[in-house]
Image (spheres, coloured by chain):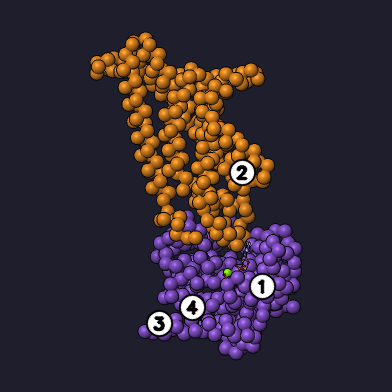
Amino acid sequence: MLENILYILYGYGSAIALGLKYTVIITVTSYSIGIALGLFIALLRVYGSRLPRALLTVFVEIIRGTPMMVQLFFVYYALPELGILLDPVTASIIAIAINSAVYQSEYIRASISAIPYSQFESALSIGLTKFKIVWIVILPQAIRVAIPALVNEAIYLFKYSSIAYFVTAPELMYIGKSIGSKTFLYMEVYIILAFIYIIISILLTELAKIIERRHTVPSFIGSKV
Amino acid sequence: MESNILVVENLWKFYGREVILKNINFTVKRGETKVIIGPSGAGKSTLLRCINLLVRPDRGRIILDGDVITERRDVHNIRSQIGFVFQHFNLFNHLTAIDNVLLGLIKVKKLPREEAMRRAKEALLSVGITEELWRKYPAQLSGGQQQRVAIARAIAMDPKIILFDEPTSALDPELIWEVLNVMEKLSRNGMTMIVVTHELGFAIKVAHEVMFMDGGTIIERGPPNQILLNPKGERIKRFMDRMWYLYSLNRSSKVA
Ligand SMILES: Nc1ncnc2c1ncn2[C@@H]1O[C@H](COP(=O)(O)OP(=O)(O)OP(=O)(O)O)[C@@H](O)[C@H]1O
Ligand SMILES: [Mg+2]
């Protein structure tokens, strides 16, 4: 078994590394787009006018109510019918980013509403405009509240980027499957993959703790009504 | 006209069909300290919120230093000229004491950092918040310290008037004094202030005029001794009797 594992690492190490590279690219890109878009959706849903609010509510419910796989297949297989042809990696990034944006928007929205209105009001009273209040008083507090959920989302995406396998994006799972079918050492291949996923998840968790510690403010929530 | 920094004319406020403020009229002179007392629900907070336009009055005019602010659209400019001190302090929870004071100076007044720093320090020292507390977060400060930082935040903006909405009623008794003391000093130094409070000692000692509000109107006004000790109307008499009763209970419990 150990021999086989070493054999795979030796013979297919560079292929696995390439797979990992695509997994990381898909995860990082879709997460970044997701958080930016999620922030935008959250802000519009909290502070926007009625129409965008209603439209976004419908959008969020549609995405949350359907499996990520359906969204991915829609982007990869259905959009070409409208003349939008995407390569597997791009299609995966788009589908995962939209899905993640919706969830991240919910985390951010919840944390915005956890900030008491009195914070907004006291910012108004010193003469700040609404726009500035959101950026320099509300969001810095809300994001701190949201950090644990946002970090979880990153770990989740790292694992579930493997869904890109189904549209043949050459990420870890896809590479693993093809090594497996060449060598018939499925057990060993998937042990290696599991190991990689676990190590990176642990690293992300530790990174999260560091970020949280950096930005911690002595019990800043709950201290005031 | 010159000596009046604030004129409130014919002010009305409704929430739905309910009248909250009914034809409020008064003026505040430069350097004057006015105390407002009255039972819960009288409309005291609403009145203060109307003055700095946190709440839009439905009718009437408010004139600040010759400027009809109820007709202005750049509300935030007006608000930067009016200090507001809240019952629950409302410091920005993610910022240290000094950053709380700096925020308005830098983001609203657009002062260069050094100048802002100088003013923030000056304001904090004037309310007795010394250097070792400047880098503390609100949650690390006592209520009295938080409220003094909030007062410093207001003072630093160099406002034309400061509005206090029950600034000591969320504080433990032994912390009330330090805040009232700062306010008294502020008043003596010529700051114009409107203070909603039930601290009778402060009102007697510091106020130039006391207004008694009930049911959305000003029922009686006059020098503190007259309003607090010899009020005319039945309603205010009853209210003051109760207030003095509580006040003396407070005094004797502190002595005991
Ligand atoms: N946003 C609001 N919507 C509806 N009614 C309101 C609102 N704010 C205040 N009121 C009502 O207006 C009346 C006056 O409220 P206000 O807070 O001004 O009273 P107050 O004199 O400050 O009382 P307290 O001593 O309890 O602080 C109350 O009856 C209150 O219920
Ligand atoms: Mg009130």
Q: What residue does disc 4 label?
A: B181
Out of B2 and A63, give the one closest to the viewer: A63
Q: Colour of chain B?
A: purple
Out of B253 and A196, give the one closest to the viewer: B253
**Kind of residue at badge 4:** Asn
Q: Secondary structure at mark 1?
A: loop
Confirm or deny contact between disc 2 and disc 4 (CB under 8 A): no
Q: Secondary structure at mark 3?
A: helix
User: Measuring 54% from the left and 85% from the top, which residue is drawn there?
Assistant: B241
Q: From mark 2 to mark 3, how far is it between C-alphas?
A: 53 Å
Measured as percent of width and height from the top left, residue B94 is found at 47, 55
User: Measuring 48% from the left and 74% from the top, which residue is drawn there?
Assistant: B179
Sequence-first disc among 3 and 4:
4
* Quadrant position of residue B27: bottom right
Measured as percent of width and height from the top left, residue B49 is found at 63, 66
Figure quarter occupied by ligand 2: bottom right
Disc 1 under 8 Å from ligand 1? The reply is yes
Which numbered circle lies on residue B253? 3
Task: Identify the chain drawn in orange.
Answer: A
Q: Secondary structure at mark 4?
A: helix
Q: Secondary structure at mark 2?
A: helix
Confirm or deny contact between disc 1 and disc 3 (CB under 8 A): no
Sequence-first disc among 1 and 3:
1
Q: Mark 4 against mark 1, which lies toward the viewer?
A: 1
